[in-house]
Image (cartoon, helix red, strand yellow):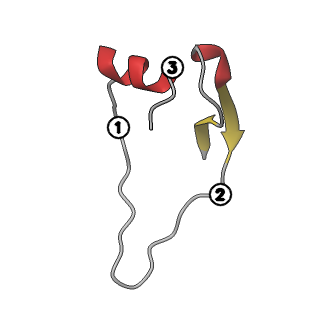
Amino acid sequence: MKAMIIKEIGTTAVFQLEEKPKPTATLGHMVVEVKATSVNPIDTVLRSVELP
């Protein structure tokens, strides 16, 4: 599966597209397929600054 990974604080340039293995369900857990997500303005602010 494809995943957008952030390994450091910064602008949208720090996003890295990576291929990850498809997760499998284990005892007591389940895998949920995400069809859509959203990003709020506060999410972009929190990602771009270092907080304690």
Kind of residue indicated by mark 1: Lys
Q: Is residue 27 left or right of residue 1?
A: left
Q: Is residue 38 above or below residue 6?
A: above
The disc, 3 or 2, on the residue closer to the chain's N-terminal end is: 2
For this rendering, which residue is in front, 14 or 26?
Answer: 14
Kind of residue indicated by mark 3: Ser
The disc, 2 or 1, on the residue closer to the chain's N-terminal end is: 2
Q: Is residue 24 left or right of residue 43?
A: right
Q: Is residue 1 above or below residue 17?
A: below
Q: In this view, which residue lies farthest toward the bottom?
A: 27
The image quadrant of residue 15 is: top right
Q: Which residue is mark 1?
A: 35
Nearer the observer: mark 3 or 2; the answer is 3
| Residue at (33% x, 32% y) in the render | 36
Q: In this view, which residue lies farthest toward the front?
A: 52
What secondary structure is marked by label 3? Answer: helix
Where residue 48 sits: x, y (%)? 51, 19
Q: CA distance from mark 2 to mark 1?
A: 18 Å
Q: Which mark is residue 16?
A: none
What secondary structure is marked by label 1? Answer: loop
| Residue at (58% x, 14% y) in the render | 11
Q: Which residue is mark 2?
A: 21
